[in-house]
């Protein structure tokens, strides 16, 4: 196995153009290597590339770790970061790796979809900004080209005043989400709902968002309707972690609880 360890983005993108597999924290990639699902011949380590660790305002470098996000990220992303794996995983794992792995259970993804984040990608030829709903196309599938790196995540200039993240799993720590959710709400009521683990890609519950955004002070029946709409918009499957029915139920309950937190 050849291992490159560039210190500049230009050298990193050149290595990727020559067929090297990017390695950030390695917390997803090395699991695949250990299980012999992947056998990369060329690997480019990204940790020494300073540009990837840069975090300025609403542009978060792909190499920013969960550890950093836990302490300085926007509220719901920081809440998500605190639930990722263990301290060791959070010290190594990055937001960029989470996005490129594109697991439906990736804890960073519900926030990114709830705020309409864009993914900044770059190759030796140049860069582009990709909206999340163009980037994620299936289970662990993205539109990132083989010669491209994810260089940063762009959040909107202004983020909703209220945000909440939650996930349901088989225990309360060190767990992959059975369902995940972020609810955001602005002071004037505009509400967004990002869902994880209930579809092949992260999803928005747009009909539920539209309904609840039009209500200034939601009543018990509005909340019940919101919960039902979120459940209806989810597209879960039954797999080794849970059943379709449980996920559909749980995501509605979770979204409602997060909305109630935003309304307090
Ligand atoms: C014990 C354990 C617990 C975990 N718990 C959670 C959890 O609770 N929640 C959760 O969401 N995830 C969890 N994970 C998964 C993992 O930690 C995260 O997805 C993490 O964010 C991956 O980041 P990384 O930097 O380690 O990625 P890596 O493993 O380095 O890379 C992942 C993939 O992305 C590619 N890649 C990395 N960076 C770039 C880039 N900048 N441009 C292009 N391609 C790139 C790699 O080639 C690889 O295909 C867990 C993993 C382990 C081992």
Image (spheres, rainbow, N blue to C red):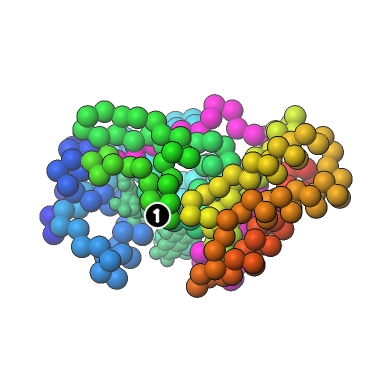
Q: As rendered, which of 93 and 132 lies closer to the eye?
A: 132
Q: Quadrant of residue 29?
A: bottom left
Is the residue marked by circle 1 packed among few (<14), some (14-19), or many (20+) residues within 10 Å? some
Q: Is residue 55 above or below residue 31?
A: above
Label 1, on which residue?
140
Q: Which residues are magenta?
A: 149-176
260 to the left or right of 124: right
Task: Say which element carries label 1.
Answer: loop
**Left or right for 202, reference 264:** left
Quarter of the image with the N terminus in it: bottom left
Q: Nearer the viewer, residue 75 or 91?
A: 75
201 in the magenta segment: no
Q: Which residue is at a point 18% across and 40% down the rendered structure image?
A: 17
Does residue 162 show up magenta in the picture? Answer: yes
- From the viewer's perspective, is residue 194 above or below residue 199? above
- Between 4 and 220, the residue placed more toward the observer is 220
Ligand 1's quadrant? bottom left
Rendered view: 135 above or below 42: above
The residue located at (31%, 29%) in the rendering is 127
Q: Is residue 29 above or below residue 158?
A: below
Where, quadrant-wise, is the C terminus in this rendering? top right
Residue 32 shows in the view:
yes
Left or right of 226 on screen, residue 34: left
Query: Picture quarter containing residue 145?
Result: top left
Q: Residue 200: image x %, image y %? A: 48, 55
Instruction: Give how far across and how far down residue 79 sits, in percent.
Output: 58, 50
């Amino acid at each position: 196995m050849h291992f490159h360890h560039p210190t500049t983005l230009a050298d990193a993108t050149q290595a990727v153009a020559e067929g090297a597999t990017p390695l950030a924290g390695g917390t997803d990639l090395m699991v695949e290597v250990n299980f012999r699902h992947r056998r990369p011949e060329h690997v480019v380590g990204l940790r020494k590339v300073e540009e990837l660790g840069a975090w300025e305002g609403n542009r978060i470098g792909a190499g920013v770790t969960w550890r950093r996000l836990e302490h300085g990220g926007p509220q719901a992303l920081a809440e998500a970061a605190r639930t990722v794996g263990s301290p060791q995983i959070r010290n190594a794992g990055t937001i960029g790796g989470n996005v490129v792995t594109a697991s439906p259970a990736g804890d960073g993804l519900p926030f990114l979809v709830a705020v309409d984040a864009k993914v900044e990608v770059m190759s030796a030829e140049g860069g582009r900004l990709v909206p999340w709903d163009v980037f994620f196309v299936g289970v662990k599938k993205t539109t990132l080209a083989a010669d491209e790196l994810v260089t940063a995540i762009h959040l909107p200039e202004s983020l909703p005043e209220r945000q909440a993240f939650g996930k349901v799993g088989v225990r309360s720590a060190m767990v992959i989400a059975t369902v995940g959710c972020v609810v955001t709400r602005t002071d004037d009521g505009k509400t967004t709902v990002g869902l994880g683990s209930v579809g092949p890609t992260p999803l928005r519950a747009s009909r539920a968002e539209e309904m609840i955004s039009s209500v200034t002070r939601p009543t018990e029946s509005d909340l019940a309707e919101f919960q039902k709409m979120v459940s209806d918009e989810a597209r879960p499957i039954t797999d080794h972690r849970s059943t379709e029915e449980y996920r559909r139920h749980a995501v509605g309950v979770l979204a409602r609880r997060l909305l109630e937190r935003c309304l307090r």
